[in-house]
Amino acid sequence: MNLVTALAIVIGALAVVATYICLGLGTGLQIWALFIAWGSFFHTGGDNDALVKSLTAHVWGIIVATVALFVVGTVGGGALMASVIVGISVVVLILGAHVPALGAIPAGVYGYASTAAFMLLTGVALTEMNALLSAAGIIAVSMILGGIFGIVSGKIAGALAK
């Protein structure tokens, strides 16, 4: 079996499991964040090193977005101030790539965007750090699980393709 066919079969089967974990078990995990991280794993190289690089950058993005949203919530100032705060936080996010462990810039952006989307669309109180940390934790666990699904699917598909 060729690798693309093996990946299609394995990822399809594991997508059933991932979706059930997120939607059927009441975990609160976000399937879309899991899939973003799963794709990021392959985009970053699809091997053990990619898992570490991708997940580390996701967590970095989650941290930066959480801090940025807390600042937006506490400083106020409307859309212009929020825009400036987001711009500054994105500079910090990208400058993090000077640290080799945070060098997977797209993966950091995926973590940042996933966090901001979840917090803003679910109405998390941006001035309540406990609420922000809880939401950030949901995205972090979802993305970590996505990376794990990535490595598992890659290994199984690789074995089937041999």
Image (spheres, rainbow, N blue to C red):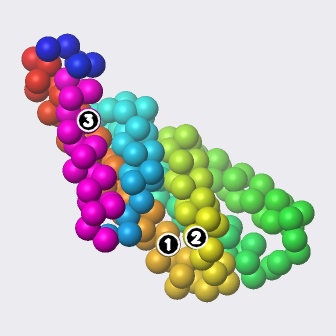
Compared to 147, does 70 lie above or below?
below
Q: Which of marks 1 and 2 is in front?
A: 2
Residue receiving disc 3: 11
Compared to 132, does 138 lie above or below?
above
- The image shows residue 101 at horizontal and vertical percentages of 45, 48
Residue receiving disc 1: 135
Which of the marked residues, 3 or 2, is nearer the chain's N terminus?
A: 3
Q: Nearer the viewer, residue 39 or 49?
A: 39
Position of 73 with respect to 7 (left or right) is right
Quadrant the C terminus occupies: top left
Q: Is mark 2 on a helix, strand or loop?
A: helix
**Tag 2: Cα neighbours inside 10 Å, few (<14), some, or many (≥20)?**
few
Q: In which quarter of the image is residue 7?
A: top left
Q: Is residue 53 visible?
A: no
Disc sitting over residue 111 in the figure = none
Residue receiving disc 2: 122
Q: Distance between the residues labelled 1 and 2?
A: 9 Å
Compared to 87, does 118 lie above or below?
below
Q: Which of 96 and 116 is in front in this view?
A: 116
Disc 1 marks a residue whose amino acid type is Ala
Q: What residue sits 38% from the left and 69% below the top? A: 28
Quadrant the N terminus occupies: top left
Q: Give the range drawn in magenta.
A: 6-26
